[in-house]
Image (spheres, rainbow, N blue to C red):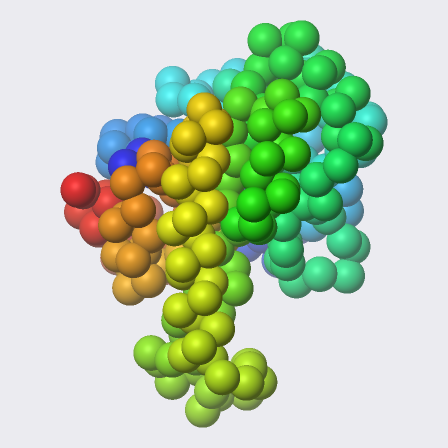
Amino acid sequence: MKLGVNIDHIATLREARKINEPDILEAIFILKNAGANQITAHLREDRRHMNDWDIKRIIDSSHIPINIESSINKEIINYLISLKPHTITLVPENRLEVTTEGGLLVNDRLKPVINKIKDNGIRVSLFIDANKDDIKRSKDLGADAIEIHTGAFANLFLVLNTNLNKTPNKLDIDNPKEKYNIILQNIFSGAKLARDLGLDVYAGHGLNYQNVVEIVKIKEITELNIGHSIIARAVFCGLECAIKEMLIRLKR
Ligand code: PXP
């Protein structure tokens, strides 16, 4: 199982002060030396963490593949194409969200964007919910890969297995156990369908040192993109240690 480390929150920390540290370039060499397989970053329309200069520096300097998440915003896509990352992952975006809240709406408006990215020799992945129609449409639209949105699974895992609902950030979810089982089953069957269709299958969002164990069991999923939990762990043990601890859990 490959690990893509999402480093957006290093830029979030920098933007808390609007100065020049922590410097994301320091992170990319630590990532490579710790054994990460890919660097992932999201160039959002509101530039709340990564900015254009960050993305250029990451792509120009990294020795490992770069996966850039983006909405279908024309200017951003053109900019990314000019920089030639290894992969562009198309994600939904909403200015008011705290983080990417659900999978992409998979329809024909994606077709010209996917074609343009692929014509420039860049792989395309679509960040989608694990439902059969979206998976089949992703294949029809010519995506190389899908990344299954694990956010709902992760939230249910927190409600069921941690003290989250004793904190001010509690989540009100009815029948969490039932929903958890359904979502996990959908991820299993979605990953199998996508693989049978010839898509590469990745997953990400909300994965952490505890819940990742369930996703690693799904053999069709070959790559995980993980950000928040790794950066959170790095606050206490350092980035290299946080990546290595995650890599241990990804071993099959
Ligand atoms: N994959 C995609 C497509 C994402 O949008 C994100 C969040 O930016 C992640 C993975 C990483 O999510 P998290 O920070 O919750 O691990």
From what the image shows, is residue 104 above or below residue 29?
below
Residue 29 vs residue 123, the one in the foreground:
123
Can residue 26 be seen here? The reply is no
Q: Position of residue 216 (x, y in %)?
A: 28, 48
Number of numbered discs visible in the structure rendering: 0
Residue at (18%, 47%) from the top-left corner?
Answer: 248
Residue at position x 38%, y 18% in the image:
63
Residue drawn at x 77%, y 61% is: 96
Residue situated in front as seen by the camera: 91 or 133? 133
Asked which quadrant contains residue 116, the reply is top right
Above or below for 50 versus 206: above
* Image position, residue 153 (x, y; %): 46, 63
Closest to the observer, 91 or 181: 181
* Residue 111 x/y as whole percent: 75, 24
At horizontal 24% and vertical 45% (from top left) the residue drawn is 250
Is 131 on the left-hand or right-hand side of 120? left
Q: Quadrant of residue 160?
A: bottom left
| Placement of the N terminus among the 4 image quadrants | top left
- Quadrant of the drawing holding the C terminus: top left
Q: Is residue 52 left or right of residue 4?
A: right
Which quadrant holds residue 213?
Answer: bottom left
Closest to the observer, 189 or 249:
189
Residue 204, can we see it? yes
Residue found at the far bottom of this picture: 166
Q: In the image, residue 88 lies at what x, y percent? A: 59, 27
Q: On the rendered structure, is 28 left or right of 240?
A: right
218 in relation to 28, above or below: below
